[in-house]
Image (spheres, rainbow, N blue to C red):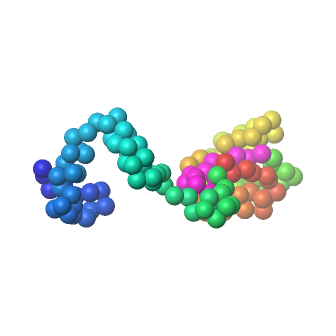
Amino acid sequence: MTDEQKNPPAGGEIPAKFEKLVGEVEKMSIVELAELVKVLETKFGVSAAAPQVAAAAGTAAPEEAKTSFNIELKEVGAQKIEVIKVVRDVTAKGLKESKDLVDAAATGAQLVKEGVKKEEAEEIKKKFEAAGAKVEIK
């Protein structure tokens, strides 16, 4: 076993008492690992799923579990030019592409930006709302 295989992804050393077990697990296929997880869950009455803090508090919100969000422009509002400026700022698109996106929003929701963190999505939403537009974070 190489040094790279002995180190778990977190970078810590594998204790000597677990080296044999880790070696056996490394030899298993994905199907065998999935079966092993089910057996361990049943045997010890635990779950391998990540715990959800919000669910434990009784206020589970599906958006809190997400790590990336998409921003859709729903309505432009009265200040079309301001909305175009925000689109240019947020997406780094040119004037024509930004105008086309804003014009297309009149017929249906348009994806402005995708895969952003929650904090960034909230900032972008505030910019659009300040310009008089309505956006939705998905």
Q: Residue at x 75, y 44 (%)?
A: 102
Q: Residue furthest right?
A: 78
Q: Is residue 65 magenta?
A: yes
Taking 27 as reference, is 120 left or right? right
Q: As displayed, is residue 32 above or below residue 46?
A: above
Front in this rendered view, residue 66 or 26: 26
Front in this rendered view, residue 123 or 97: 123
Residue 35: image quadrant is top left
Q: As displayed, is residue 101 above or below residue 46?
A: above
Give the residues in magenta.
63-74
Q: Is residue 132 magenta?
A: no
Residue 107: image quadrant is top right
Q: Residue at x 77, y 45 (%)?
A: 74
Taking 113 as reference, is 75 left or right? right
Front in this rendered view, residue 124 or 42: 42
Q: As displayed, is residue 7 above or below residue 42?
A: below
Residue 85, percent from left and from top: 71, 55
Q: Residue at x 25, y 64 (%)?
A: 12
Residue 78 visible at all: yes
